Image: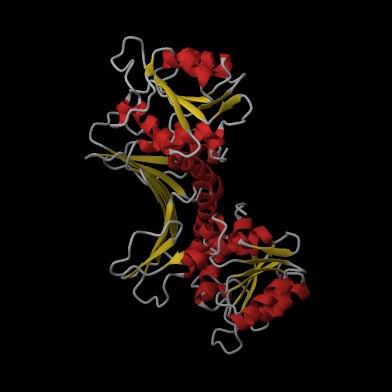
Amino acid sequence: MKIAIVGCAGRMGRMLLTEVQAVDGCQLIGGTGPSGAPEIGSDIGLLIGPTPLGITVSDDAEAVFAAADAVIDFTAPDATVVHAALAAKHNTALIVGTTGLNASHQSALDEAAKSVPVVFAPNMSVGVNLLFALTQKVAATLGIDYDIEIVEMHHRHKVDAPSGTALGLGRAAAAGRGVALDAVKETVRDGHTGAREAGKIGFATLRGGDVVGDHTVIFASEGERVELTHKASSRAIFARGAVRAAQWCDGRPAGLYSMLDVLGLA
Amino acid sequence: MSIGILGCTGRMGQMILTHLVQHHRSLIAGGSGSPNSTLAGQDLGRLVGADPLGLTVDTNPARVMARASVVIDCSSPAATAHHAALAARHGTALVVATTGLNAQQQQAVFDAARSVPVIYTPNLSPGVSVLIALTRQVAATLGPDYDIEIVEMHHRHKVDAPSGTALGLGEAAAAGRGQPLDALKETVRDGHTGARNSGSIGFATLRGGDVAGDHSVIFASDGERLELSHKASSRALFAHGAIRAAQWCSDRPPGLYSMLDVLGLA
């Protein structure tokens, strides 16, 4: 499968180049960057190691979409809108990991999905997506006599709490229970709290060191608890999920898909 | 629906009876115990330190079955084989909470399932059943680049290793990979082991204190790991599971079922 990476010199872009090279059945055929960027004209191989590949970084996204079976896009919302139109025009599958899309950016993806397979996922780690699906299923199975608590830890630089992934896990748990997360969320416990209210979903946030990301969903009842945990040790897992999504698009009909579709968990 | 307990004077039987007396008094059809027991004829409510129920420990299980739509059997392997035949004759649903049945005794249980609904499962705790189902699904989804390790801890008196539940989890993982556990199992790591054999399923066993039972299934890859865990804090949870199973199978068609069926995870 011929794969190209747009925004290939960015932090995720470089990881994606490395990952495509490493996977059997995938051939890296091109990469792009913004016009005027320093990496334009450089050999792609030299972005990730000492060995040139004989492919240069281009600012001509159109040519790259024309040549590729699938393009992976972890760029920025406005660029992603342009890429979506190119994907539809050239019948190229598109894998989008760009975050921060608003409704209008999103509708550009919906439009492209009428012509080509588009996989859109803010978190492409296989493990985290599996955890979303497992959490929803367990929340639906175990019932209200199990208290749900979500604990997460990230490195010292992270500024938002709880993490987006923790909130995603909370939404999955709430969906399993058939309620909205906002109605049951508890993110602060400080001082005399009174006993725990049944049906709430509690969150606990830890910050320190260089932890890439640890998340645990606890289901605690009289006599037992079930704990589902994900621990990331490297951001390469997002690249791995993206390449898996690209391969999954081979022969796939047009449509908008999530990582749960790619993983067979939807 | 009415529930009878066979072997109600033993530890498991009393635990189940206690839960029923506290939460579902009106559902109790009766309880049986060994004719040799000093508790024969004792009031069932008084037996577990509650108000009298007006029903006593019966030495004849057939009488209990005649009054109950479902019985929970926590007697002994030999008695269970006899109870299975009785249940089939009386058209009473049967939840087998007895463990350690030999092949012949198991066959008696399977035979009864031709006439009545029978729940037969190695661990009645809802949490462990959920973990077994999740383990199988995750092992099938994640592929061999995820190393599977199963860690368990139990109290200082436990004599067998790994625990039956840990082996059950290993079976589920191996089934997810489409292979028999014996081909993949690794239970000893001592001295210079060489690098890990890809595809193997490793077991680690810890013993100490009064731990009721902790189990973790770890799926570890480059960059991330997923850990599915269960921690028992009291054996009362088996009682919850048995009662839930009884309520589920009371009006089911004849057949052999497990906790996975009860929980909708099969």
Quadrant of residue B258 within the rendered picture? bottom right
Residue A249, relative to residue B141: is it above or below? Answer: above
Q: Nearer the viewer, residue B65 or B218?
A: B218
Q: Is residue B158 left or right of residue A189?
A: right
Looking at this view, name the residue that lies furthest to the top: A36
How many numbered discs sit on the rendered protein?
A: 0
Quadrant of residue A182 within the rendered picture? top left
Residue B207, relative to residue A110: is it above or below? Answer: below
Which scheme is used to colour this image of the protein? secondary structure
Q: Is residue A16 left or right of residue B70?
A: left
On the image, the x and y values in percent for residue B23 come to 55, 60
On the image, the x and y values in percent for residue B123 come to 53, 65
Looking at this view, name the residue that lies furthest to the bottom: B36
**Residue located 63% across and 78% down the image:** B103
Q: Nearer the viewer, residue A116 or A202?
A: A116
Q: Let me know if residue A179 appears in the view.
A: no
Q: Nearer the viewer, residue B148 or A55?
A: A55
Q: Quadrant of the C terminus of chain A?
A: top right
On the image, the x and y values in percent for residue A163 come to 35, 33
Q: Is residue A177 left or right of residue A122?
A: right
Looking at this view, name the residue that lies furthest to the front: A54
Q: Let me know if residue A215 appears in the view.
A: yes
On the image, the x and y values in percent for residue A201 come to 43, 40
Q: Is residue A157 left or right of residue B177?
A: left
